[in-house]
Image (cartoon, rainbow, N blue to C red):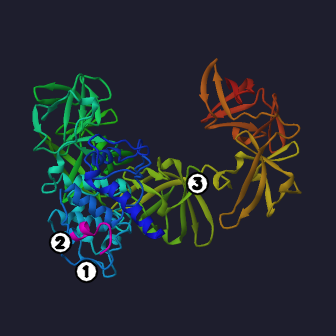
Amino acid sequence: MKRKTISLSMLVVLLFLLLPGAASAATPSFTDIQHHWAKSYILDFASKGFIKGYPDGTFRPDKPITRAEFTCILESSMGTTPSTSPSVQTFSDTANHWAHAQIAEAVLKGILVVSEYPNGLKPDGAILRSEAAAMMIRALGQSPDNAVTSFNDQGQIAKSMYAGYIKAASDEGLMNGYPDGTFRPFQVVTRAEACVMLSKLVNEPGGSSSSQAPPATTGNTSSSSGLTGLVVQGNTYTLSNSKIYLRNNQANVPVYSINLSGSLVYINNTFPFTLNATSNNPDLVVNNARYLNCQLSVSGNDLVAVPASLVLDSVTYNGSTYDSYYVKLYVGGKNDNYYLSDAELVDGHTVKIAGANYDLGSTQIAIALGDSFYAIQGIEITGSDISLSLTAINPVVVSSLDLSDISAIFVNSQSLSLDTVSTLFFIVGGSQYNLSDVTIDASGNFTANGKNYAANQVTMVITGNSNQTNFYQLESASSLGGKFIFSCTASSVTSWAIVNNDYVDASTVQIISGAGAYTLNNVLVVSDNLVRINGQQYSANNLSCMINGTYYSIEDINYNTTLNLPTLETGEATSAPVGVLSSQPTSYVFYLNNSVYQTGATGATINAGGTWAAFGSITFPDSSHFAYNNTSYNLMGAQVQINGTQFTISDIALRLSSQVMEVYLQAS
């Protein structure tokens, strides 16, 4: 009896969640979708009675949806009423299921195919994205398209029996891929995703039903008047015959009603906007034109929208449609973080990106569609229909490189024999990246870990067949015939170290023994946690270190015999040792003639007994002296070089609270 009671309770809840007759006319409110990306779709579908929330007031948008639930919502949204006594033979495990009638109707209409589930439908199992694609395309009465898709995981898609339906669903705009370009055919569909794709389905030709009528108006619009059209840039579009959308949270919400109440306009009785406002105006989409920041007014039965700018909402090429929000855009061959939706369309040959205008004839503006790259040659704008004139070009960005993708490496204009290269990696932002880990654009810029770097910010590390490792400073990277040519010089860093897994200049790391400070490049690592300094051996337990003005305990110090450099792992920050200023400077400001000459110590060195030492490699035992390799020197009168120009220190001031040292210079 207990099992029967639970099953009956589940049936009541499921009927409450799914049956359209249980819907309220007012737009529902759920406690857990306030900031969800699919909020507008969920509210749209719920307001039409196609889906309900849970008795506790939640919707649970990221919960997987079952095959039975998806079938019921699909039929409900399309206005299909299942037979009360279905005669069609269905699945072995659905005869006594609560959704038996809806499943049977889907089988009768060819939406579900019994032979595809030889072991039963498993109606309470989560539906996969590939299955959902097949059901929707069949519901529209369309056929699969067995052409190759543009998704990055085409190999996975090809493994699905529904590959052709995935292509068709993508082309119809029912299902999009993910920002990484994948489709993920074997991933389950969530309740939120179901609302999005089925909302698109019922707005397809042949997919709408009488349930498309807008819900009853809420209290906000009880005295409202309905508008029937939208006017944009002199063109009129009727709600009944045009594809009009409200852009909301990077998703297009179909517009099925526009109501006027005083100075407010309500779209779908859910989204209020103030007439003649100068801010918080909507983005509206008609066909593939997206009108941004539309100032709204009313003329007769029409809503008049005056957009601040125009962008492309989607682009269709070679039979595939791409959302401009996910189409990468490249300006002048650079891999900046732009997308096609960032390009405002000024006229047929001009786009505006990040506030700057670009003439398509002067600056290459390129996009990536799938794995191919195209230069935009021109833009044709006919009302709300926008088309791009595209020309295929060589890849603007290249990733997943290996040694075979390198044509030549020049060191000081001398060609390096690639046959002698055993391993190659890059140091970018202090971290190590293999060839396959970086992306290089047509301008020679690197992208690593989501950040962009110029070539001269990158160090190339090459280990030859003789196991000798060399560090080179890149000057440029260029592409020729699909392969890269690297030009570089010997690294300005003469001694490297790995500190907390980052590559650093060893001369900028101080090893502290008592009150003495020694640069790491002058410390001999004898074995694990044992070092020799000035002929004496020390255990790492008795040492500390200073990096960028902060003292740390040493957890481990060792030597990497493959790269021939020391490695260091630091512990917690510690106080300064006895005999050293408790607060070391972390930054510098250089003054000349009482004006700021330079902020920061980049390119600045100080003469320490004939050695030009970087400011990051010295310590300050007191406010009048600096120390380098355990030798103390006077600050006053010391010689300083900044980018090759020599000065003499006339005065200094250490601001202990901010750890900024002010260095006053006079020309030498």
Give coordinates of residue 171: x percent, y percent: 21, 59
Asked where in the image residue 341 lies, by quadrant, the reply is: top left
**From which residue to which does the magenta span run?**
95-104
Give coordinates of residue 505: x percent, y percent: 66, 49
Q: Which residue is drawn at 49% across and 60% down?
A: 437
Q: In this view, does 108 lie above or below 389?
A: below
The answer to which of 519 and 401 lies nearer the viewer is 401
Determine whether the residue tagged by mark 1 lies in a helix, strand or loop: helix
The answer to which of 648 and 2 lies nearer the viewer is 2
Quick check: 568 left or right of 141? right
Asked if marks 2 and 3 touch (Cβ < 8 Å), the reply is: no
Compare marks 1 and 3 and give the one earlier in the sequence.
1
At label 3, the amino acid type is Ser
Compare marks 2 and 3 and give the one earlier in the sequence.
2
Residue 147 is at least partly visible in this image: no
Judging by the rendered image, the residue that carries numbered circle 2 is: 108
Q: Is residue 617 above or below residue 599?
A: below
Mark nearest the camera among 2 and 1 is: 2
- Identify the residue at the far front of this view: 1
Judging by the rendered image, the residue that carries numbered circle 1 is: 115
Give coordinates of residue 394: x percent, y percent: 29, 58
Mark nearest the camera among 2 and 3 is: 2
Judging by the rendered image, the residue that carries numbered circle 3 is: 431
Quick check: 625 left or right of 455? right
Tell me the CA gap for discs 1 and 3: 54 Å
Q: Residue at x 64, y 17 (%)?
A: 594
At label 2, the amino acid type is Leu
At label 1, the amino acid type is Ser
Report how many numbered discs are placed on residues in the image.
3
Tell me the CA gap for discs 2 and 3: 60 Å
Quick check: 266 left or right of 330? left
Q: Would residue 363 be counted in the magenta stretch?
A: no
